[in-house]
Amino acid sequence: MLTAVLFCLATRLSRSHPFGPVTRNTVDLGQQYLPFHAYWRSFLLGETHGDAFLNWNSGFGANFLGDIGTYLSSPFDLLVVLFPADQPELALYAITTAKIAAAGAAMALLLLRLRPGPWPLAAVLGTAYALSGWTFDYGATVPMWLDGLVAFPLLCLVGEWARTARRPVLGPLVVALAWIANFYTAYMATIGAAVLLVVRLLTAEESATARQRIAGALRAARGVLLGIGLAAPLVVVIFLATRGADPTPETTFAPASWTDLLARFLPATASVESPALFIGTPALLLALTLPFNRAVAPRVRAVLTTAIVLVTLSLQWEPTHLLWHAGASPNGIPYRQTFVLCGLLLVAAWFSAAGGVPRPAALLGGGALFGALAWTARGSVDIDRWTYPAVAAATVLALAAVPFALRAVHRPARLLPVLAVALLVAAQGGEALVTGKRIEEQRRAEVSWSPRIGPWHTAVAEATARADAWPRYRTDPGEVPGGNDVLLVGGQGPDYYSSLTTEATSRTLDGLGFGHYAKGRHPVTLDNPVTDAIFSIGTRIRSVPTGPLRQDEPPRATVSVTTTPVPPLVTVRRPGRPAGHPGDSAFAVQERLLGASVYELPPVTRTGRVLTARCPAGSRLWFWGPEYRGTATLAGEPPVEFEGKPPSVRAPMRPLGAVPATGEVRIELTSETRPRLPRQPVGCLVRDRLDTAVWELTATGATRVRAGGHTLTAELPPGSTGTAVLAVPRTSGWRCAAGDAEPRPARSYQGLLAVPLDGRATTVGCSFRPPGVLLGGAVGTAALLALTATGVLHRRRTRR
């Protein structure tokens, strides 16, 4: 309760939703996790077109089981069904708060199991763990990582059970739950729990023999392996999906300066380039007293202190950095494992204080270390104007609690310990409030954000629901603020932001002139009639905001709906080479996939920042500059903005206007840098040619299309020959067949699903099975059998 109250108060002080008007939807929280949770609610209530294998709403068909395991497999995420459909932000905030509170409770439970001591102190230290700088700076905006925050103390408990030969069945189940909830941070938590287990094996029960210690370590290893095996049906799917995901640029680890690292132990500091180590001044002071506290056994002091120092050093050394992150240096936040070090520091604080207030010598030693830390950190760029005032106030309150605690030991009374705990809570909680408030305010000012969900999203969702005709054709909801728009408002567009966006999907859409964010893992819609025909987008929703986007107000927009004739989702291409212009420009790729020449691709003359060409009068001029950042203006038309910023952002092709009667095209480029353009940046779309191509594909295409949760089947005109093309990116996991033939891995036609036709089959069908399902299921079954055998043997041994 203390953890939850303090977290909500910090949100209120920062005026963030749901306790204020300002959006919390910064970076991936708004563009990724919020839409996924909104879709998860619809999925759990049976309101989606897809199933657990496939999500038809995103990326023209995406592996949903991988996304479930990456973003939505936490038991806490089931809480979304308790909230209204139009309140996904509130649901996600409640889930975030529940996870943080559970982490505090789990840490308090662990501390009491490691060593007897006063439960109020365990509660305060548990809250310190749950409301660490890592939580405010990283976890609160990446809710899936919070499962690792919960997992670390639970996995440490599993280590205790293994060390003492207890609960051989429950232990692996806890490991499995942790790895299912979020395997990424569970991996880090498992390493951290192993560190604490080693400490415990080396320090507990001096009478224990080396054989007993080794046996405890082997029991722990067995429990971890069984638990990971039980989680394999999800973990294997995620692993294979990650291997097939669009690769992000490799990053080289650069350790933070030691000044910045030390500064992150202090309150109100925020940065993605240094580890978030704040646990509160009182808790940190107690941890720093451990090396000087003679009331603690020398071996415990030495081993635990050494472990904490080594873990701290491991944050800064590239080989151990890679070990913490499973061999790949992550993009964005390089110190995602910091919550483990925060937990170990709080274990040290507990060991130093569980037996009573540390003696004056220990307090002086710890205070001297803290003073040196604070003094050394004073020059860090991460220091906030609130940092040192918060440290001073917390120190005064913590020191004021010491005499009450000491007198309570020598003169038992109810009031004295209550006063001591109240002062400790005030010191620890006050710093947490200041830290949460300042980090939230700094984040909103410095990083990208999405507005709160409101009338704009509602209007688009309602229009999309009215127009939806899936699987007769797709409905694209267009651009809505935030990312993963289709997960919030419905439809079947290309918008999709996931760490598992396949390279095949990304490259196919990039080649067709689509844009992307997040280095390729967030493809966005392309409002182009040729790609609409290719992907059977019959209805397109367009919305324009009625005013500027604000952090403190949900946006509104005017919405329009346009429906045009398009071919069905399954079409037939004639035998032979696909028609269209040669080359690798997006215009030529579109034509080859469409099977018709619909653009005029004129030679372009470039003079400085002006492009000139000749096109058919009345045709529609399209400009393609995926790496271009600036504006492009066709003479007589308004300027059009492009936001290319390689490798992170790729600009989609956009129309510049109608070609004048003279056929002369003059495009003026305005950019801060010299524009880098492809060889064929201009295409002139002749509408009559496109209409003819659409009519031909419709006449020879499927007469009926049916879509299941992860299947797509179609009836074709008799005698169809050539290749049946399904408007779905050809990603690993698809199997297709024509007629009654045996399903085989799908072929590719310019990046889309393809099935060869021999003129005899009148039906085609494809189904999707996430790669790794069978292997993961087999491993999970074997682990379950092994766990059952372990339980039976343990029960027999106990009876004897």
Image (tube, grey):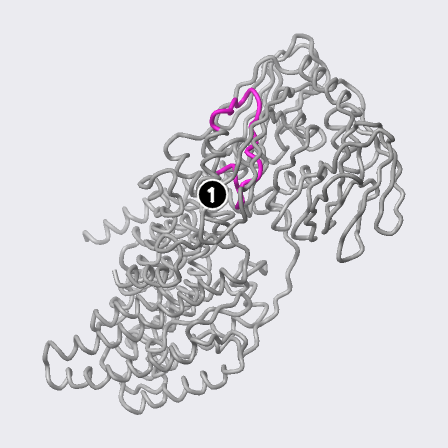
Q: Nearer the viewer, residue 137 or 111?
A: 137
Question: Which amino acid type is marked by label 1?
Answer: Pro
Residue depicted at x 54% and y 30%: 768
Q: Is 514 a magenta residue?
A: no
Q: On screen, 50 above or below 233?
A: above
Give x and y (percent) for residue 169.
30, 50
Q: Main secondary structure of the magenta part?
A: loop
Horizontal placement of 29 versus 123: left or right? right
Q: Which residues are magenta?
A: 465-487
Name the secondary structure under disc 1. Answer: helix
Q: Nearer the viewer, residue 718 or 216?
A: 718
Give x and y (percent) for residue 148.
41, 57
Horizontal placement of 357 versus 29: left or right? left
Name the image quarter holding the N terminus: bottom left
Circle 1 crowding by C-alpha within 10 Å: few under 14, some 14–19, many from 20: many
For label 1, the residue is 35
Give x and y (percent) for residue 738.
62, 17
